[in-house]
Amino acid sequence: MRRRSLAMGVAAALMAVTGCAFAQQGAPAGPAARWSEASARLGFDLLGQPAKAKAPPNPAVSPASLAAALSLLDIGADAPFRQALRTVLRLDDAPSDGLAALRGTLAPLLAGGGSGPLSGVGAVYFDPKSEPLPAAIELLRKAGAQAEVKDLSDPATVAAINALVKDRTGGLIPGILDAPLTKGGLVVLDALHFKDDWQTAFDPSRTTRTDFHPAGGRPVKVAMMQGREEALPVRREGRFLAVALPYRTKDYSLILITTTDGPARLADFAPVAGWLSGEGFADKYVTVALPRFTIRAGGDLLAGLDDRGLKPARLSPTALSGFSSRPQAIDRIVQKVVIAVDEKGTEAAAATAITTTRSIAGPPPLAFVADKPFLFALHDAASGQTLIEGYVGDPSKAK
C-alpha cells in the first residue's frame, strides 16, 4: 500500500475550530450555514497574503476572531465603510442586516462566558480624546461587548488590555499590543479560546517518526499520529482528499485537506478552499495519519484586507463617525493565533486588535506667526497683575 502523509493545508486547522461548525451529515446547519463558506474563503484569502513577501512555512489566521472584531466596527460605521466590511467578509450577498446577524452568530466570541469548548470576549476601548459618543458605547454593550473609556497612551491601559487577552486565551497569547498608543482613538478587541478532546483519540503508542514531504523541499521527520479505521465525513475530488475529525462536543471538528499525489503549495488549494465549510462530505471508512504540531503565527492583516477593498472606505474621515465626533483612521489590524494538535485533542487561541489614530477634525488650526511687531505681557494669573508688558517692534535691536 502506498504511504500517504496527510500534508494538511494549515488553513483548515484554525478555520475549523474557530469559525466553522460541522453538522452530522457533513454540511453546516442552522444560522452558521450562511457564514461557513464566507469564513473559509476569507481565511484562505488572508493566508495567501504573505506570498508577496517571504511566506512563512506554516501560516495561520482566525477568520472568526477577525469577523467578530469587524462586526463591532460595523456598529459605528458609515454606509460606505459598512459595505466595505461586507465585501471583505465575503457577505455581499447577505441581507442588509447581515453584519448585525453575524454578531448574533458570533455572540460567544463577543459576550464571553459559555460552558462549551469555545469561549471569547469582545471589547472596545475609547481614548477620551476621541470624544466617544455615549450612544455608541450603549450599542456596543447591547451587542455583548465590553465598552470602556480609557487613556490609550497610559501603559496601565495597555497592560489591562493584554491581561484580558491572556486571561481569555487560556494563557496561550500573553498580549496583543506592544506599546501605548500616543495618538490612539480606539481599540477594538476580540479574543477566543478553544479546547476539546477528539471523539476518538489517537493512541500515543502508535505515533511514529515518519517522513513529511514539504512542497519544493526534502522530506523531514515528524511525529505522525496514526488513527484506526473508522467512519468519518470524507470528500474526494480529483487529486484532493478531505476528512473531518470530530471532537467530543457536537458540531466541532477539524477539517483537513491534502493531495493524493505529490505535495501541493498553498496556492494549489484555492479550488477546494470552500471545502473548509464542511459542504459535500459523506461518511466513509478511512484511516487518518496526522502530524502532531503546534503553530504560533501572527501579523498585521490590514494590507490583506485593503487588497480586498477596505482601503478607500476606511480612509474616509466619516468611516467611523458613529463612534466618535473625531474622525478615526484605522492604522493596524493585528492578529495572533496559536493552535496545538496532539493525540488527545486540540487547544487553540486567537486575538485580534483593531487600532485607530485620531484625525484632525474641522478646519485647519490657526497659525500665530510673530514675524511682525507684537505686544507681550508677563501675566500673573493668581494676582491678576501684569508683571511686565511690552512691545517688540524690531527684535534685532532687542538685545
Image (tube, helix red, strand yellow):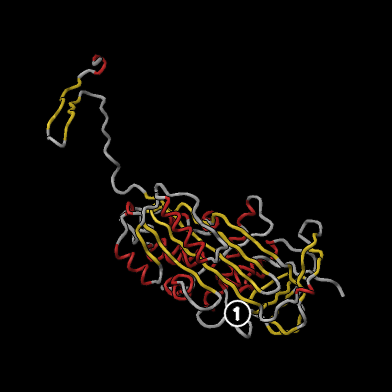
Residue 24 in percent (x, y) is at 62, 85
Instruction: Give the camera-side residue of 224 and 261.
Output: 224
User: To which quarter of the image does residue 294 belong?
Assistant: bottom right
Q: Is residue 338 above or below residue 112?
A: above
Q: Tell me which residue sits at (36%, 53%) in the image.
A: 151
Classify mark 1: helix, strand or loop: loop
Q: Is residue 235 left or right of residue 149?
A: right
**Residue 310 at x, y = what percent?**
48, 58
Work out whether residue 286 can be spotted. yes
Q: Which amino acid type corresponds to the residue marked 1 in the rendered image? A: Phe
User: Which residue occupies the foreground of this view, 201 or 44?
Assistant: 201
Please identify the residue farthest to the right as the structure is shown. Answer: 1
> x%, y% of residue 86?
47, 66
Out of 338 and 322, give the one closest to the viewer.
338
As drawn, which residue projects farthest toward the left?
384
Return the x and y of residue 23 as percentages of the image width and height: 60, 83
What residue lies at 87% left-to-right and 75% top-to-bottom? 1
Count of numbered tags:
1
- On the image, which quarter does residue 396 sit in? top left
Horizontal side, residue 142 vs residue 176: left or right: left
Viewer-closest of 394 and 262:
394
Quadrant of the rendering where the C terminus is positioned: top left
In the shown orientation, is residue 24 left or right of residue 212? left
**Could you classify mark 1 by the number of other residues whose Cα lies within 10 Å: few (under 14), some (14-19), or many (20 or more)?**
many
User: Residue beneath label 1, please?
Assistant: 22
